[in-house]
Amino acid sequence: MICYGEAVLDLVDELVDAYAEVFSAPPWNEDAETIRRFGPRLRADSRRHGFRAALAQSEAGVDGFATAWLTPADFPADRVYGQVAAQLGPARVRRLLTGALEVDELAVRPCARGRGTGRALLAEITADAPDGRAWLLTSRLATDTVATYRRLGWHEVAPLPGAPEHTAVVVFLAPHHPGAAGP
């Protein structure tokens, strides 16, 4: 199921609960304050251009979700965007990321893992990405997550020559992103 814009806020409490269960555990280990801020962040994100959320639900409630929006031409500098810009350089950011669908969160509760839930959420959230252009980033320390994206056909964007080889974040392009083929 896809929700667009602020319609996702009808489920904000369930999404915060799922977020807390997923991201308080290793390798994320998010603290209570970071988890508390997810609800207000989701409210703000739901007003972003092109915002959508894909939901996996069962009788127990929300088993997982993904959120995404269109990356603005004026590439953000908050959160880890500065690291991404330094890693890729302005020309590659413009060519690969701006105007593309940015998958911001992907969370699957432990009880729903191993059944293709994450794969289905990624496929659903990126199905209408402009010209197949979708991207996401994750922590390099989340080795299982990095391996999963690779297994699902997502392409890691190599840092520019001279950029730190082992940055904290890994940028991935969707399997059908036109920039995934190379420079």
Image (cartoon, rainbow, N blue to C red):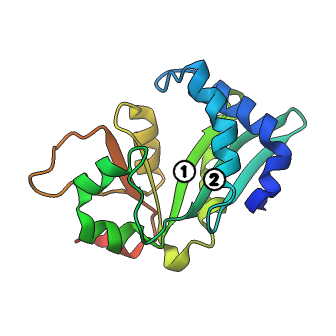
Q: Quadrant of residue 141?
A: top left
Q: Is residue 69 left or right of residue 72?
A: right
Residue tagged by mark 1? 104
Q: Position of residue 175 (x, y in %)?
A: 45, 65
Viewer can see residue 180: no
Q: Toward the viewer: 171 or 94?
A: 94
Residue 72's place in the image compared with 81, above or below, is: below
Distance of label 1 from label 2 (alpha carbons): 10 Å
Q: Position of residue 59 (x, y in %)?
A: 90, 36
Q: Quadrant of residue 142?
A: top left
On-image quarter of the C terminus: bottom left
Type of amino acid under label 2: Asp
Q: Position of residue 170 (x, y in %)?
A: 34, 46
Q: Is residue 175 left or right of residue 58?
A: left
Residue tagged by mark 2? 45
Mark 1 and mark 2 residues within 8 Å of each other at the beta carbon: yes
Q: Give SS at disc 2.
A: helix
